[in-house]
Image: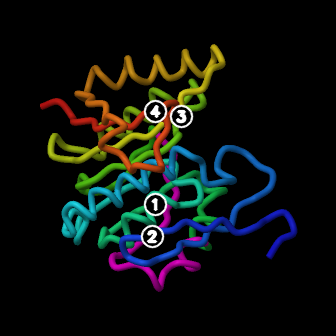
Amino acid sequence: MDTNTYFRYFDLESIDVTLKFCQYEYGDVNCVVWDAAIVLAKYLENLFVQKKETFESKTVIELGSGLGCVGLTAACFGGIVTLTDLSENVQQLKQNIDENKHFLKGKAQSITLKWGTTFESEPFDFLLMADCIYYPEVIEALVKTMIELTTPNTVILISQELRETEKQKNTWKMFIDLLTEYFTLSYIPEEEQHPIYRSSDIVLINAKKKK
């Protein structure tokens, strides 16, 4: 293993699984498992505990997968998962899929997806994204991709850490303003999230595409 990398472990107590992610000491936004990803992954575990067949054979896409924590969690619960990121990160995603493939009840694959470009696929049952709102210049492309990959029946779950810089506040507002033109948003209260893995500065949203 590269000297600039180390392993991060993530427990799914409901199925007695510990996922293992290779992450980097230095890098851009895709180099570590962010807290917002953990909050969303643990919310998926809540959904699984409440209803075991929630993800069984369902098609799932994760946008901006990073190290793949959220998507691989869905695959552990039976989802047919496509993890996506920019081309320079797909090899890292493949590595983390390989590290954890023996835990997957469903399937997982990693592919390159640049937001705003055409992606040939049927709409997905679930669309997941964690801490993807960072660069204002890609917001329009991101929402375009969300529109193309979903139907009004798609379950869309968004987790985001709300950062305090003016740039990040403005970027989040830009995203929400554009998103609400095409989707109805419901904010998931903390009491419905995991009792430990939740935070007042991480928002969890259930979005539904407008008809």
Residue carrying label 3: 161
Q: Nearer the viewer, residue 39 or 136?
A: 39
Q: CA distance from mark 4 to mark 2?
A: 23 Å
Mark 4 is surrounded, within 10 Å at the Cα level, by few (under 14), some (14 to 19) or many (20 or more) other residues, namely some
Residue carrying label 1: 83
Q: Residue at x 39, y 37 (%)?
A: 204
Residue carrying label 4: 141
The amino acid type, in three-letter code, at marker 1 is Leu
- Look at the numbered discs 4 and 2 and tell me whether their residues touch, using CB distance below 8 Å: no
State the quadrant of the C terminus: top left
Q: Nearer the viewer, residue 139 or 2?
A: 2
Q: Residue at x 58, y 79 (%)?
A: 99
Q: Earlier in the sequence, mark 1 or mark 3?
A: 1
The amino acid type, in three-letter code, at marker 2 is Gln
State the quadrant of the N terminus: bottom right
Q: Can you give x and y, in whole percent of width and height, for residue 142 in the image?
A: 44, 35
